[in-house]
Each structure stands twice: as C-alpha cells, then as structure tokens.
Image (cartoon, helix red, strand yellow):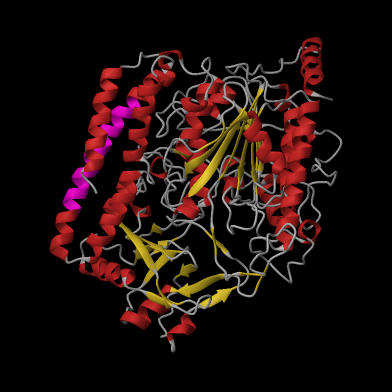
Amino acid sequence: MRPVGFFAAAGLLAAAFGQPALAQCNLGNSIKHIVYIQFDNVHFRRDNPNVPSDLEQMPSLLKFLEGNGAFLTNHWTPLISHTAVDILTSLTGVYGDRFGVPIGNSFGLFGPNGAATFPSSFTYWTDLLADGLPEMLDQHGKNAPAPWVPFTRAGCNVGAFSIANIEFENTTTDIDNVFGPNSAEHQENVNNHNKAVADFEGIIVHCAKGSALCANNGAPDTLKDEPGGYSGFTALYGNVNVQSQISPGAPVKDLDGNVIADSHGNQGFPGFSPTASQTLGYLATMLEAGVPVVYGYIADAHDNRGPALSGVSTATEQTFGPGEAGYVKQLQAYDKAFGQFFTRLAADRITTTNTLFVITADENDHFAGGPPSPASCDGVTTPCTYAKIGEIDIDLSQLMATEFGEGSPFTVHSDDAPTYYINGNPGQLTPLTRRFEHEAAALTAFNPITGNIDTLTQAIADQQEQSFLHMVTADPKRTPNFIMFGNPDYFLSATGNTAHCVPLSSCSQEAAGFAWNHGDFQPEITNTWLGMAGPGIENVGVTGAFFSDHTDIRPTMMSLAGLTDDYAHDGRVLIEIMTDGAVPATLQQHRATFGRLASTYKAINAPLGTLGKNTLKSTTAAIQGNDTTYIGYLAQLKALTGQRNTIAGHMIQMMEASEFAGIPFNDIAANVHVTLGQNLLASVP
C-alpha cells in the first residue's frame, strides 16, 4: 500500500479501534520525508583521467542531484578522514572532540597498565567503554546528544539501515546495553550468533510517541544524558522487530526482488557492506510504511562485492583498480539501483517536491597500484587491468627497530595515518615521546609498486595540534601521543615484533586484497562531495564556489526541516544553496555578509581549512627540530588555539543565533569578526 493510502487508512483504523493515532510528522518547508544516504568511498573525481569517475558511471544518481538541486564539489571531511569519524561528523554537525570518536574505525584507550587497547568506533549510541565513560562522549563528559531526537520529538519515526552508531553495531555489548545480559536476545546470540546478527544488527526504527507503526515490538529508547530529557520513547531494534511492522507477512526485499539476507541465508541484515540495491530497497520499504526520515549507508563499488554483482569470483580478485571490468559492472548495478529507487519513490509520490534528499560520501580514497594496461583504457569501452595492485603493508614495530634500533613498546591504530600510543603514555615533552616523533618523521620504506625508497611520513600532529584540529576528547585516555600522516600507498600497523628486516625491502608486503587507502590528510582522500535536492534547495547544479565540510550537513538539514538541536553545531547552514524563502528570515537580507563570515569561520576552524592545514605543516617542521625550538613553538600554538577558539566561538554563536533562534544578524559585528579571522589567518603563513 502506498504512503497516501497507508497514512489515511492507519489514521481511520486507529480512531475506529481506540488506538493511538499515527504520530504526525511536523517538518518545515513543506518537507514530508528526508532521505539521507552516505556512501563509502564513492568518488566524483576521476582516479584515472581516462576512466569516468564512480558518479559519472552512475548517471541515474548524478543527473538527479545535478538536475534537481545542488552538487557541492568543494566539500571536505574532518581529520582523521575515516569512515566512522566522517559519518558521525555528518550525522551530528560537530567534530570528533565533541562526540568522542575523532581517530578512525577504532581508537586507542590507555588502560591502568599504561598500554592501549583498541575498541571499535562502531557501537550503539549509548554503549560504555571499559573505563565507564560513554563511547559517544560529548565535551562535558556526557553521552553525546543523539541525532534522531529532534525528529522523534517532532512526531517523525526515524529509520536507519547500516549507518553508524544509531543502530546496533554488534550483538554483544549493544544487545546487553539495551536488553540486558539475561535477555532472550542475549541468549539468541549465544545459541545462534549468525542469526542474531541478521536479527539485531544494522537496522532500527526510532519511534515518535504515539506511532502506530511502533505499537508492537518496541523496547525503550533510553537516552539518560539527552539535554531536555527523553522519556517515553521506544524503538524497534533490528530486522526481527522492524520487518513485521514495515512488511508484515513477507521479508524485506532489495530492489531486484531478492530477499535481503546474510551470506548464511538468514533473513535480515546482510552485513555492514550492503549494496545499493539492498540499502535502497530497505529504505524504500521503510518510507512506504510510514517512516518519513530514513538514513542509509552503501558500501564502496571498488571492492569486489561478489560474482553476482561484479561477475568476478572473490577468490580470483578481492579489489579492483579504476576501469577494471568488475568495478565497472558493479557501478552499473549501483546506477540501476538508483534508477529503480527514484522511480519507485515517484510512484509513491515521494519526490523532490516534498522530500529532502541528502547524499554524500564519507571520504574519498587513494588507489595503491601501478599503471593500467592498456595505458589508454577507459574502463567503459576498453577494460583496464593492473599488474600491480594493492596497498603496501608495513609493521612499524619492525621498521623502527630496523632503522633506529627502537625497542620500546607501543601500539597504533592501524592505518595509512597511524596514531601512536606509547606504553606508559609519556608526556608530550618527555625524551621518549620526542625520540619516537623524530624516528617516525625519518622513516623510509621500499615501495614494491615503484621500486623506490619512500619517505613514509608526510605530516605529524602532536597533542597540541590534535587539539587545534578538534581531535582531543573529554577523555584524555583516548588521546594518542602523536599522529603520523603517512604516504597513502602504505597501510601501517604495529605488532610488537622487533625483528630486523634484512634487506629493508622485506619489511614491505604488497597486499592484493585491498588497494584503496583513506584515513589520511591528502586532498584526494579528504575532498569529497555533497548533493542535496528537495524543498528549499535551489537548483544550482554543480558548484565548488565555497568551502563546506561534513559539519555543515546537519545544521542545513535542521534549518530546512524547521527543527533545532539541543547543542551548538560546529558547522553552519549552507544558505548559498537555499531558495530565498527557505533562508532563515534573519539572514535573507544579509546573504553576502553571512557568506563572508561563514567562509572566514571555516578557514580558521575547519580541520582542513586554511589555518588547520598551515598549522599541521608548521607543527610537522617544529617536531622535527630541536627541543628548545619545539617548546617555544608549542607555547605559540597553544596561544593560537585559544585565540582561534575565542574568535570561532563568537562567530558560530552569531551564526547559530540567526539560523535557529531568530536573532537579527548584525553586519557590523560580523565584519569585525571577519577582520579578526583574516588577521589570524595572516599570522600563520
């Protein structure tokens, strides 16, 4: 049954049988639905100049965004540019220092013994770490505000499929957190783990009060630290509870008519690498069943998703280079899925006239491999092949022992930008930390792709620089001693093995199973894209006229939906892509001045704004110098951080007041702060 009929029927049945009426979803700008989709590593730029980019090979999506709204190409991630951090930044509108997970897909946590363990960054919103603090930790040491709350308070059910941390990410701590260790759900995981994963992970509906959809199967949606309180709300946790409400009597199917199931045949969540057809099929079913706000995640298309999609066995090839036949075939399947999705929604009367579409990618990534053959291949008419493909794996424990005789124990978050956690958590200026920084800065390695000896380290962030880049949380036990931003051809880990590599080339192993690196700071990784279409969005097409990053997505969505969060964002509303009527009334006569203020704010506050990039460069040079010079630099950077925080704090307070609180925008005060910001930029060449 399609939405119009369903809503009307549900309301009549509820009234007839004395049941609670269907919750009324109240959003601004005539928005009736919100569809939020985040890709993993799907590119707008070309990785090979001859091969059309991912989005160029998905015209059903690209033309939809270009033809109906705004497609932003000067859009950036936070640092570190990694899946969990990027998605959570997009969902909340704040940087990682304000939601507790600023490092990567896992992060170090120093324990009582001085060594770091590495909990996953993917966990349900209210889970606790081993030290008793919420993993999703705000700057006050409380559980960070949850992104679904303004919607459910406004009467809107919120559904999610595979997006980070607003649904179960595991069947252990997540299940016990919500249902308890003595629950039937816990016991199912003990008895049949695979079925429990399909039943409970990756899928959720957070319910508005009075929602008929959530009258059955719901469990308490508990948020103990939520500003303003959050009591009496429920959620449908997992496919086992969601499917019977959104598709009663039949399993949910993908857009090609296949039952959504895992690799063991269990109906439900297929795992955290869903195809476009699976994610979009589940979101469409949610929308049709009366879930007006939906969030979904879609896996990248460059890793082999299996022969049904790529035509290539995973035993033969696990990842593809640009223009390889399997890669192109998977993009064709993704393109087909988006065509089917938009057609299906249009039949449901879910279109850009009443639906806000927000689509982005968590980050881009770097292809680690040799040149294609033939050199002129374009992938579409002439497939590309690669003799050399795969990231270069190196054990930093071995490499540092080989090149410097380093034997002190340490661990890292494995990445091409590894975060160092030195056992004992020595201070920033201790001889041990300084020695490690100097050694890391001088590391070299053999590159089997090029045959060259590479300098591994391209930048270093100490703890003061991490603070400047919004990477230090309220829990000091999570802060690494330093971060090494490396050559993106390499994937760097630390096993503790200090056996020397003889010859040096034996430290480098090209791994054919993965060839796309991210988590670093290079523009090819951190410069991504954002598309928005729907009520209140001007049809501006493709534009790179202004800087934006993932923190700007949330406040723009909230402004268009007529909602407010219970906290100040780090991002700002993108009024440049909004119609005149959708721009907050307090800003309609101040577009130009607001734009200058916002541009200067992002330049001094965004991790990949001008000031952030300049301080990272300066910090790297200072770390490599002598201790006297470095100590002086640290004092300067600390003072600069304080200045920046003060100026940026006033700027965002001024912008948020006009964006969400109806406070008139003051051009004079804005221009003063623009000048202060520009002076700050000029102080750091």
The x, y position of residue 604, in whole percent, is 31, 39
Q: Is residue 647 magenta?
A: yes
The x, y position of residue 279, in whole percent, is 71, 43
| Left or right, 606 with reference to 426 | right
Please say if 47 is above or below 625.
above
Q: Nearer the viewer, residue 458 or 242?
A: 458
Q: Nearer the viewer, residue 231 or 625?
A: 625
Q: Nearer the viewer, residue 413 or 114?
A: 413
Quadrant showing the N terminus: top right
Q: Based on the displayed image, in which of its 4 quarters is residue 220 positioned?
A: top right
| Left or right, 378 with reference to 594 | right
Please say if 652 is above or below 494.
above
The x, y position of residue 207, in whole percent, is 64, 27
Q: Is residue 164 magenta?
A: no
Q: Residue furthest bottom?
A: 502
Q: Residue furthest front?
A: 376
Q: Based on the displayed image, in which of its 4 quarters is residue 420 positioned?
A: bottom left
| Left or right, 236 with reference to 448 | right
| Left or right, 639 with reference to 601 | left
Q: Can I make out residue 399 in this image?
A: yes
Residue at 35 percent across and 54 percent down: it is 479
The x, y position of residue 578, in whole percent, is 52, 23
Which stretch is magenta? 634-653
Picture mark count: 0
Q: Can I make out residue 294 in this image?
A: no
Residue at 76 percent across and 18 percent down: it is 7
Q: Based on the displayed image, in which of its 4 quarters is residue 423 positioned?
A: bottom left
User: Majority secondary structure of the magenta segment?
Assistant: helix
